[in-house]
Structure formats: structure tokens, C-alpha cells
Amino acid sequence: MAKEGTLLIVDDNRSILAALRLLLEKYFARVLTLPTPNRLATTLREEQIDVILLDMNFTAGINTGNEGIYWLSEIHARRPDIKVVLFTAYADIDLAVRAMRDGAVDFVVKPWDNDRLVASLRNAYNLARSAREVKQLKEIKRELASEQPMFWGESPAMARIREIVEKVAATDANILITGENGTGKEMLAREIHNRSARSGELMVSVDMGAVPETLFESELFGHVKGAFTDARADRAGKFEVADHGTLFLDEIGNLPPHLQSKLLTAIQGGRIFRVGMVARGGEFREDLLYRINTIHIDLPPLRQRREDILPLAEMFLKRYATKYNKPIEGFDQAAVREMDEYPWAGNIRELQHTVEKAVIMSDGRRITPATLLLRPAPAAVQAPAFSTLEEMERGMIGQAMARYAGNLTEVARQLGITRQTLYNKIKRYGL
């Protein structure tokens, strides 16, 4: 086992300090000791401590544990990121409950069992490390907040959606966002998050179509060390990481029924159990649908908001012209006309990829139809020509998406593949 983290032991018995240092130096990169808590404040300023093993009684003849509770509160006031395990010779249930309520992660009784003590301290370190990772994610989230804002456009459909978002963002209601592939469901979810009281916390996105069934519970609910063969340490799941923030479950329709029931239990109860903490014994469950469908927002496809095609294209043009250092000023009239008439089966995502490719291929100051490279709608009586199997597969999927207006369930049925396989191919081909 690799030695990680810094442990501070605070106990007035020097023999205990020596014994604990000898034991715990095998498990921590650094083990510091203090025979009195009076130097705690200085040590916390000077050292990067991960875990503290704190005795509860330091004054002779007093064994109430109040000293430990006091120093616990002092530690949390100065360094709330540090995890504290309390250490006492007096096993008092009420005292243990009080200590845990005040923020201790565990309560160990003297004389101690070596394995029990090591497990408790290592668990405390893992919690401290997880908290650090979450803090780093929050810092990344603040950087991401400077990304492109939600593009609302001018269409009446998007104006109605904006009104709904302004009302529901102030609540913690479950929201179901539906829409064809590429209509901007995740961007809308992020806009709702940014307008909410949770905006200072994380928004965690989970691609449900990419989570293997065997890892579903571990990914979403986390696991404890030893829960299965490769569980070498405790791990927080996406629900736990997103606590106090927003959890965005993308492509939730890909979940098989037996996993939907586990998700329903978590959403209904507002609590999760990591794998290993407790024993656990083609349609979308109606009860899960009702639970996530407090508010339903249906994003319209791009072909139903054609007034937004050019403004979106101009926004992407500006972004990619800057990225690739191209002096491109806009689209010529023929290109504008082609974009307006094109069906955009892949919606905003397809438009974005089309503009990026056009910027890369363009040598002039305006994008022309020649650089847009839009595929003409296939004629009903003429089979398209493809040079590779990949091109043929991409073309067939694109045609089916256009024919069935982006209804992935119907597209998958017609192509004779599962919805998840279709979803993975759409991502692969950028449709």
C-alpha cells in the first residue's frame, strides 16, 4: 500500500504517541505528534494536515470529553477540510453521538485494535482526499462558467422555454428535458443550473448511454473499499459529488428497466447507498417518468426554429474563425440560402460541426456553399453512392434521422439496432 497523506496525533500520553507513530508510519507519508492541543493552531497554520487523531481528555481527573469536543470545533473553525477521528479511554455512546454530530468522522476507544484504528484513519484520509477533489472540480466549474452562454434566439418556441426556465430555475424541482439529438439539452440544463441557487456548486453530467450496466451503481452511487475485486478504495458516486449542486442524467431513456428501479429509489428517497454498504437484492417505468417529470421542457428541432439558423451559424463562425485564426467575415447569400433550406437532422450540433469544417476549409473572407459541404437530401428513388462502409452507415443513419424527425427510438427500430448502439454511432459520426 502506498503511503499517502499527513496524519497529526494529539494525545497527552507520550508512550501512546510513540506507539502510534511506530504503527501508523507504515500507512501515512508523514506522522506528526503533539503532546498538548495548545499548539494546534500554530501547527494547522504551518502544516498541510489531512487527518487528526484527537484525544478527548487532556486535564488530569477530567474525563467528560468536553475538551475533545472543544478542540474539534476549533479545528473545524480554522480548517474545515481536515477530517478528525476522536480517541478516548471512556466508551460513552452519548459522547460518541455528540462527537459525530459535531463533525468527527469516527470515534475510537482505547485500548485500540490496530486494524480497526488503521481502517478508521485511512477512511478519514480517503474522505479528505475526496473533498479535495470536489473542491478542485468546483474551481474547474467556475472556469467553465465563462463558457458560451445559452443562445435563446428569436423563435417563439424558445421564448416560451425561456419563460419556463426563469420560473423553475429558482426551485429544486426535477426537470425532464426532451428533444432530438443535438438540440442543446445539456446546454439548457447548464443554463438552469447557472440561474439557480445551486450555481456556486457543481453541475455533474452523466452520459447514461456510456455507463456499462455492471458499473451503473458504482458510477452513480459510489462504492466502499472491498465491495468488489477492483474496489481498492472508497469512491464517491456522481450523486454524492453533485450533492447541493445539479445532476444531469443525459440519455436517460437508454436505461434498462431493472436499473431504472434503482435510479427511482435514489431520486424518491433523496439518499443513496454506496455499493458494499448494504445488500441489494425495453420500457421506461411510468413511476420514474412521473418522478423526473415535475417540469417538462421539450426543445424544438432546428428545422422548427429556422429564424435561429443564421444567428447560430454566425456565432459559431466567430468562435472558430478566432480559434483557427481565419479572417472570415461571414456567409455569402448562396450559403445562407443553403443553410436555411437544409433539414439539419443533427440539429445545432450538426450546424456547429458544419461551420467548423467550413472555417477550416475556407480560403476566402466569406463562407460559400462549396466550403459548407452540406449533403443534399437523398432522392427517394436514387440510392446514394458511398465509397466506404463507414460512409454508408453514416449516410443511412442520417437519412433515417431525417425521415423520422430525430425520433431515436423509431430510427433504431427501423435500422434493426438497439437505441444505445444508435446513440454511440451518432456520437461517433458527429450527427
Image (cartoon, rainbow, N blue to C red):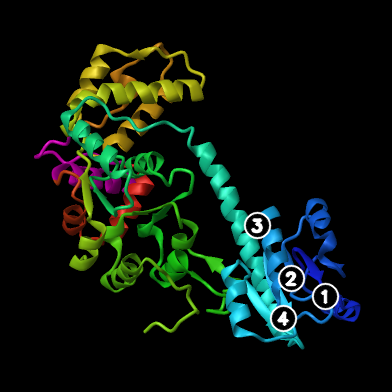
352 to the left or right of 94: left
Q: Indicate the position of residue 366 as horizontal and vertical percent values.
A: 36, 13
Quarter residue 431 falls in: top left
Q: Indicate the position of residue 336 as horizontal and vertical percent values.
A: 25, 18
Residue at the image position 84 percent from the left and 79 percent from the top: 60
**What amino acid is at disc 4?**
Leu
State which region is magenta: 377-403
Label at residue 59:
1
Disc 3 is placed on an element classified as loop
The CA span between labels 1 and 3 is 27 Å
Label 2 close to label 1 by CB (< 8 Å): yes
The residue closer to the viewer here, 11 or 52, is 11
Q: Is residue 316 above or below residue 382?
A: above
Label at residue 117:
4
238 to the left or right of 264: right
Residue at the image position 62 percent from the left and 73 percent from the top: 99
Q: Residues within 10 Å of mark 4 (few under 14, many from 20)?
A: many
Q: Badge 3 is on which residue?
A: 81
Between tags 4 and 1, which lies in front?
1
The CA span between labels 3 and 2 is 21 Å
Earlier sequence position, callout 2 versus callout 1:
1
Between tags 2 and 4, which lies in front?
2
Disc 2 is placed on an element classified as helix
**What amino acid is at disc 2?**
Glu
Residue 358 appears in the figure: no
Quarter residue 179 falls in: top left
Q: Residues within 10 Å of mark 2 (few under 14, many from 20)?
A: some
Label at residue 173:
none
Q: Indicate the position of residue 382 as horizontal and vertical percent values.
A: 13, 38
